[in-house]
Amino acid sequence: MFKRTIMALTALACATEIYAQVSLQAYRDSVYVCSTEIELAEERLSESYSTMKRRRTDFYPSLSAEASYQLGFRRFDGEKLCSFAVVPQLSQRLLGGGVRAMYRQAEADVHAEYYSAEYVKTEMLYQADYAYWALSAMGLYRQAVEEYVGIIGSLAQIVRERYAEGYVAKSELLQVEARLSEAEFALIESQNNYDVALHRFNNLRGIYEPDEVQLLESILDSIAMPQRVGFEQIAQRRYDLQAAQELIRSAEFGVDAVRAQYLPKVELSVSGSWRTYSPNMANKTYLDGALLLGVSVPIFHWGERRHAVAAARSGARMARSAWQQAKDDMQQQEADGWSALQNTLLQMRSSLRNLEIAGENLRISTYSYNEGRATLLEVLQAQISWMQIYTNAITARFNYAVAVSAYRFITSTY
């Protein structure tokens, strides 16, 4: 909570700069501050901590008091109409009741909620990375389509002039006009995709207005490929696995707590009383006290203990199974994440080579058409090829950036 407060103050102090230019780390910090998921996780942790402190009070003596006042409507032989009694009692559980087991269970629940909250924080970091890279990609898509529209528009202007001079047929003019219309339609779609990405970007950091931002980092930047992490290291780092382990401990202590409810209980209490005599003849009072050692022994409950303990043991076995399933899922996630890293890196390198070839082909086709050495169809085909390969390059870089963030999330190496 203290960290969130400090980050919130920092975000407010730098609000003007953040809204204009946003780095990846600054965006992560703002998402961390504004995340309701993190806030809920911290509240669950606070709730479990309060439960643990409440369980701790069961170790200490408890003090209670009872008071009564009686007012009658008839008198008998000079008896007073009213009487009262005050009875304080101090009691202490000496044995039984599962006090220690319930406290240990609550303590394990606190640890589980702490690890769960940390896992939510790393999950939000991944979501922040994804939104940041998605906005970068959508911005590049929009720029690419704008450039594509400009290329088609320039070609259309040349074709119009040649058509007016009678050098080209109307069919060629219609072809390029249709291609220009398609490009303008694609530009509208790319603008919508950018707006959607911008809305998600702003919503994650608590801004609900379509404020434009300038990203200081881009998917075009060089992003270092992380080193592979072994399964044992991941198991020690992953907060969800540590939370699952604490839930196993909680369930095992829960078995002890259930079993203790059907074992003998010993309680020591000291009580006193200040009351009027009965019958109350002269409004005189007296003090009295007592020491009580109570023993409670369950004898026969129709097999209730056996069934309750069996149900608690089933809960412990399910907790162990859930931990094993989470561990298996983690191993598969790591393997898939590493494969995605390698494949996206290869795709990115391949797309860059293809982009160079497509760009050179487009320049040659455009120049040849202007010189009368190539047909319009060849130029249009070169433009389509360039646009497809350029968008593929953007997609490959986006996929690589997301794969890096996903692997860091999977291995808890943020």
Image (cartoon, rainbow, N blue to C red):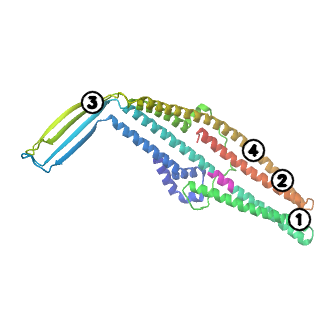
Residue depth check, mark 2 versus mark 3: number of the one nearer the observer: 3
Q: Secondary structure at mark 2?
A: helix
Instruction: Tell me which label, 2 or 3, sits earlier in the chain.
Output: 3
Q: Secondary structure at mark 3?
A: strand
Instruction: Estimate the spatial distance between the alpha carbons at disc 4 and disc 1, rounded to whole Å.
Output: 36 Å
Does the CB distance between marks 2 and 1 fall below 8 Å?
no
Instruction: Estimate the spatial distance between the alpha carbons at disc 2 and disc 1, rounded to whole Å.
Output: 23 Å
Q: Which residues are magenta?
A: 131-138
Seen in the image, is 57 located left or right of residue 204?
left
| Residue at screen point 81% across, 56% down | 384
The residue identified by callout 4 is: 347
The residue identified by callout 1 is: 172
Q: How many marks?
A: 4
Instruction: Estimate the spatial distance between the alpha carbons at disc 2 and disc 3, rounded to whole Å.
Output: 94 Å
| Residue at screen point 20% across, 45% down | 68
Instruction: Estimate the spatial distance between the alpha carbons at disc 4 and disc 3, rounded to whole Å.
Output: 76 Å
Residue depth check, mark 4 versus mark 1: number of the one nearer the observer: 1
The residue identified by callout 3 is: 294
